[in-house]
Image: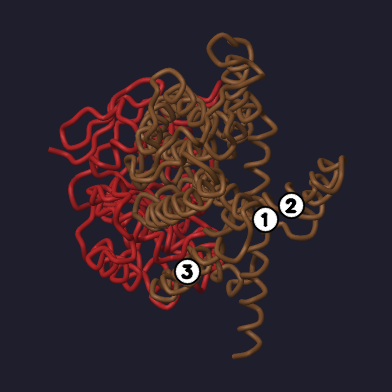
Amino acid sequence: MTDTTVTSAVPEATGPATTRLIVVAIVILVALAVLPHVVDTYQTQLLIYGLLFAVAALGFNLLLGYTGLLSFGHSAYFGTGAYTVAFIVRDLGVQSMELCILGGLLGTLFVSALFGFVCVRHTRIFFGILTLALSQVLWSLAFKFFWVTGGTDGIRVASARLTLLGGLIDFRGPGAFARFIFAYYYYVLVLFAAATAVMWIIVHSPFGKALQAIRDNETRAGFIGIPVRRYRWIAFVISGLFAGLAGILWVPLNGLTTPDILYWPFSGEIVFMAVLGGFRNFTGPIVGAVVFNYLKAYAVASSEYWQLVLGVVLVILVLVLPSGIVGTIARLTARFRGKAS
Amino acid sequence: MSLLQTIDLKRYFGETRAVDNVNLTIEEGEFVSLVGPNGAGKTSLCNVVSAYLRPDSGKIIFQGEDVTNASVTERVKAGIARSFQLVNLFDDLTAFDNVALAIFSRQGKTRNLAALAHLDGEVNNEADTVLGQFGLAAKRNVTARGLAQGERKLLDVALAYALRPRLLFLDEPTSGVSTRDKGQIMDTIASVVRGEGITAVIIEHDMDVVFKYSDRIVVMHQGAILAQGPPDAIRTNEQVAMILLGSAGPDAFSREH
C-alpha cells in the first residue's frame, strides 16, 4: 500500500463528496421503491431479507471496519432483538410493530451494553473469542430453557397478528401474506434507509473519526486524549443495536424465531457479508449482505451442498478479492479514472 | 511554582535502572534538552511522565497537582503531550484528519456522533493552520502512510502540538531522517514551539542541535541525572564530554564544522 493514489481513493481518506453521494443514494432508493411492482412476492421477500441483513452487517462493520474489532458473536444481538420481539408478542400480546421495535431495541441495548463492557477489555483474538463465547451462552439458554424459549421449536410470531404504523395497516382477511410482504418491504426499506443514514453520519462524525484513530493506533489515540476503552464500548453498543434492529425486523418475516439465529455459524455469516462486500468501504457490508442473501438462497435451492458453495466463494474471495466487491470496484474505478485523466 | 516536578522518580526493569531517583524540574517557557548515551533512561523518563509507563515509586507534580496516578488521557487533558521516537500516527487517515482529530479531542468534540466532522469550519481552519506551520499544507489529503519519513516525523510532532499542551515532550524528532532534513525539521519545530511559548522537553542525540536550541541541558546517565545547566556550562563539563563522546578535553564538542 505504498501507492498513495490508491490509498486516497478510500472514501474516508478524502472528504466525502456529499452532493454526489446524496444523488446516488436517492437514485438507488427510488429503484428499490419501484422494485416490488416489477418482481413477484418471493423476490420481494428475498430482498427484505437482504435489506435487514444489510442493517446487521452495517452495525457489525462499525466494529470491524471502523474500530478494528472483529466480533464473532453478533448473532447474540440479532437474536436478542428477535427473541425480545417474540416474547413481547407472545407474553404481552403486543400487536404494534413499533412497540416491538422499541422493546427489542431496549432488550438489545441491555445485552450489548453488558457483553460489550466485558469484551472491550480485550482486543484482537481475545476480543473475538469473548464475543463468540458470550453469544454461545445466549444460544445455550435459548436451546435449554425450552419452557421459556420453546427450545429448538422456537417461538412463533405470526405476521397476520401484527400491525404497522400504530395500527394503521393490518393483515387480516384474504391475501394477507402477499399484502404483508408488499407493505413490510416498504417498512423495512424506510428503516434500512434511516439506519444507513444514521450510520453514515456516525462514521463521518468526530466520534467516528476517533474510532478510526483507535483502529489505526490505539496507543496514539490515547495520547491525543481519546478515552479508547469507553469509545470502543459505545461503538460496541451502537453496533449491537443495529444487529438487534435487524433481528427485530427479521422475526415477522420469518414467522418464527429459533436458537439457530443465536448460534455461532450465523455470526460467521455476518462476518462473511462484511468481507464479501468489503469492510473497508462504507457500502461494502450493504452490498455484501444483499449479495450473500441471494447467494445463499440460490445455493440452498440448487444444491444440498450449499455450504460447500459458500465455502468455495469465501476462499476465492479471500485469495482473489481481499477488498471485497465494493473495494474492488472502487479500486478499478480509481485506476480507470487515473488512466482517463 | 515549577511547571513540572518529579520527586525521587523510579522505574526499574529487573536489574536495569531505567529511571533512578530522578528529581527533575521544568520551568514554564523553557526549552530543555534531555541528552545522554543510548540506554541512559531519557525515553523511559519521558514515558513515565507521560503515563506511558507507571513509576515504581516517586511522584510527578504538574502545575502543583499530583498526577502520579493519572491516566494517559487525564494527563493529556491536564496539558502534557508528547511525540514518539518511532512515529505513531493514524496511518489510514489523511494528514489533515490526523491533526483535526487532535483538535476535536482537545475541544471535547470527539463525543459528538451526530455532526459531520468535515463541516466543522473552526476545527478545519485550525487543522489547516497547524499543517501549514509544519510545512505539510501540500500533503493535506495524503494518508499518513503515504508520507515521507521526514514528513511523518513532523506530523507526529504536529499532532502533539495541536493539543496546545502546557508541556510538550519531543522524543527524538529528527531520528531516522537524513542529515539534510534534520536541520529543516528542527528549525520548523523550534520556530513553532518558540513562537507559541510552549514549554518543551526534547530528547536529542545531535549535540549541535542541542546546543543551538536549548535553554537548558539535562544530561542523563544510567537512569540518573548526571549534570544540568545552560549550554555553555555543559559544553565545558569534562565529565559530560566523557560520557557522551568517550573523550575529554575543551574541544570535545567543537568537532568538524
Which chain: brown?
A
Disc 2 chain ID: A
Give coordinates of residue A63: x percent, y percent. Answer: 51, 43
- Image colour for chain B is red
Q: Is residue B44 visible?
A: no
**Crowd band around label 1 with a 10 angstrom C-alpha radius: few (<14), some (14–19), many (20+):** some
Query: How far is the residue under mark 2 from the one under mark 3?
Result: 24 Å
Q: Is residue B66 above or below residue B194?
A: above
Query: How far is the residue under mark 1 from the one under mark 2?
Result: 6 Å
Residue ID for mark 1: A291
Q: Secondary structure at mark 3?
A: helix
Residue located at (40% from left, 57% from top): A197
Q: Secondary structure at mark 1?
A: helix
For badge 2, the amino acid type reads Leu
Residue ID for mark 3: A30
Give coordinates of residue B150: x percent, y percent. Answer: 50, 67
Disc 3 chain ID: A
Q: Secondary structure at mark 2?
A: helix
A20 or A98: nearer the viewer? A98
Residue ID for mark 2: A295
